[in-house]
Amino acid sequence: MVGMKSVHLSVFAVALVISGCKASAPGSLETSVATELKQNVTIGGKDAKNPTLDTPDIAHEGQEHFMHHCQICHGYDGQNTGVPFAEKMSPPVADLKSKDVQGYTDGQMKWIIENGIGPSGMPGWKGILEEDEMWKIVRYMRHLPPKGSLGMPDIFKEEAEEHQQLKSGKTDESKPHSHTHLHQH
Ligand code: HEC
């Protein structure tokens, strides 16, 4: 029992070291300790059972809520497709199909939706989404489509198209432009 306790203490010590030096990228050991800490200590709801049925219809309903609330950061497919700032957020927007995220229990995923992950950019939806809506979104997160298969969110598509037009506008035959200029975009 004494042994167990000191193991836990040292895990927390590592966590303190990690949070104390944000400047350096964490090594894989630190990352896995941090992940484990997050999954076992910070994130609640581990044993809560998903009360919704595990059917394609329910996953589809969850997808509709996801399209409403989550796609702006996570993309339609939950894998950040077409979200221009996903990598730039700190921490970056999580890939919901990744092993780490799929490693959560349904209860933990629902807890994350409900409470968010402060102080990151992941907001909480308590009071905004109904309980069963959150659980259905979890169902969708278990059945995410292949990356890129749903395209990028409309809101970013327009932006990308405008950018594309701007770029092709520069190739206007009447005004020849230098090669380097074209490639600076
Ligand atoms: C404003 C942008 C934003 C929105 C909107 C958003 N998220 Fe996130 N989400 C993030 C960021 C950033 C992270 C990474 C946080 C981290 O790693 O600490 C994240 C992480 C997650 C994670 C993984 C957490 C982990 O520990 O790895 C889940 C699950 C998740 N989001 C689900 C959702 C769902 C479901 C919705 C909609 C109800 C949603 N998110 C809406 C930005 C967002």
Image (cartoon, grey):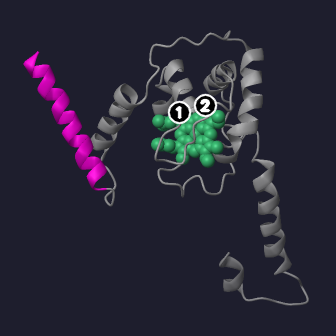
Q: Where's ligand 1: which quadrant? A: top right
Circle 1 SS class = helix
Label 2 vs label 1: CA separation? 6 Å
Residue extending farthest right: 174
* Residue 60 image point, x, y percent: 76, 23
Residue at x 77%, y 30% (from the top left corner): 64
In front here: 78 or 19? 19
* Residue 117 image point, x, y percent: 49, 39
Q: Residues within 10 Å of mark 2 (few under 14, many from 20)?
A: some
Please state if 35 lies on the left or on the right of 45 as rendered: left
Residues in magenta?
1-21
Q: Which residue is mark 1?
A: 115
Query: Is label 2 in contact with label 1 (beta carbons under 8 Å)?
Result: yes
Residue 131 higher or lower than 160, as above or below: above
- Residue 46's label in the rendered image is none
Please state if 24 lies on the left or on the right of 160 as rendered: left
Question: Is residue 49 something that shows in the picture?
Answer: yes
Question: Is residue 78 something that shows in the picture?
Answer: no
Q: Is 131 contained in the magenta span?
A: no
Disc nearer the start of the sequence (2/1): 1
Count up the numbered dots.
2
Please state if 106 lies on the left or on the right of 2 as rendered: right
Q: Amino acid at mark 1?
A: Asn
- Residue 126's label in the rendered image is 2
* Residue 105 image point, x, y percent: 49, 20
Residue 79 higher or lower than 104, as above or below: below
Location of residue 16 by image quarter: top left
